[in-house]
Amino acid sequence: MSQDNRTQVRQVLLITLVLNLFVMILKAGVGFAIGSLSLQADALHSVTDSANNILGLVASHFSSPQPDRDHPYGHHKFEAVGALGIAAFLGIACFEICQAAIERLFAEMTRVTIQGAELWILLIVLGVNIFVAFYERRVGIKVDSPILIADAKHTMSDVWVTITVLAGLVGIWQSEALNLPQLQWLDVILAFPVALLVFRSGWEVLRENLPWLVDEMAVAPEAINAIALEVPEVINCHDIASRGILGRQVFIEMHMVVAAKDVETAHQITEKVEDRLTKRFHPVRVLIHVEPPRYESDQISY
């Protein structure tokens, strides 16, 4: 049975929520003060960071791994739904960034003015983002929380976004010294890679969590069959199915023919198989349907 890690998850989400709000306010303030589209877009990305933390808190509240009467298979999918919500927020942010950049391309160029003080503020923001990303990822792996791991990936995308924007603003800062007013276009041009980074982050979160919701195969039936046949009394395994995600929770069901003369012996054999599967794919719940020899089949999988 999986451990209930929701208390630790909520603590991390609350800490990162405060830090993300701090980052968002700084980015938005500097972005509007200097008239930078790329930095305003980056602030929008940080808005999704805060929204993701709130979403994670809500999802974590409902995602107890312990089964109950209404949810006999546990509540893990609530957390997967929360991770998909993060992907949706990223998609919205990507659209908003692209729309604003395209509008700026066809409008009169807006001059961006930035000083060294604003750049130092953005370096502080970058440091906070890096801390949040590594902190969430470390704790997420430790407590096996997909919400924290997904949110850490999102925050890491924010790190690269901020680095990209910061590089562009440094170029704009030096445009007058270098007598290159064309560098002002860096603000608009770099808004597009920002959008691509946001989209990539959302796609990775979607790709990792969708298999859980659509009950994609978790373990190859051939691997399950091989483990079961390691028990000498097992004659045949067929109609093997699995779902879930390795490392979170896996459900396995199978039909099995065993060399047993009574129910008690058959039960002992199935327990041996369950123990082997548990050691290999923990955490896992196994359902075995014992059949007489005449039901032997060569159809390992459905």
Image (tube, helix red, strand yellow):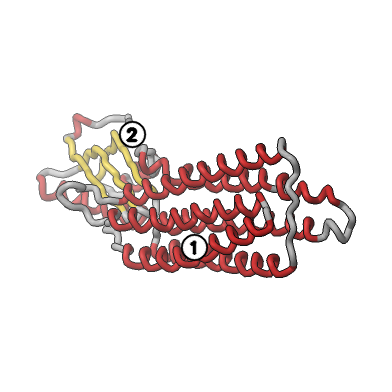
Location of residue 116 with respect to 298 vertically, above or below: below
Q: Is residue 291 left or right of residue 14?
A: left
Mark 2 Cα-neighbour bin, 10 Å: few <14, some 14–19, many ≥20: some
- Check the image and name the residue furthest to the right: 179
From mark 1 to mark 2, how far is it between C-alphas? 52 Å
Q: Is residue 61 left or right of residue 295?
A: right
Q: Are marks 1 and 2 in contact (CB under 8 Å)?
A: no
- The residue under the point 57% across, 68% down is 128
Q: Position of residue 247 (x, y in %)?
A: 39, 54
Q: Nearer the viewer, residue 144 or 91?
A: 91
- The residue under the point 60% across, 38% down is 99
Quadrant hosting residue 221: top left
Q: Nearer the viewer, residue 201 or 234?
A: 201
Q: Which residue is mark 2?
A: 300
SS class of the residue under badge 1? helix
The mark lying in front, picked from 1 and 2, is 1
Q: In which quadrant is the N terminus drawn?
A: bottom left
Location of residue 12 with respect to 180 vertically, above or below: below
- The residue under the point 22% across, 38% down is 257
Q: Position of residue 25 (x, y in %)?
A: 54, 62
Q: Is residue 108 left or right of residue 141?
A: right
Q: Position of residue 265 (x, y in %)?
A: 14, 49
Q: Which residue is mark 1?
A: 21
- The residue under the point 42% across, 45% down is 84
- Please tell me which of labels 1 and 2 falls first in the chain: 1
Q: Is residue 260 left or right of residue 120?
A: left
Q: Position of residue 272 (x, y in %)?
A: 24, 53
Q: In which quadrant is the C terminus drawn?
A: top left
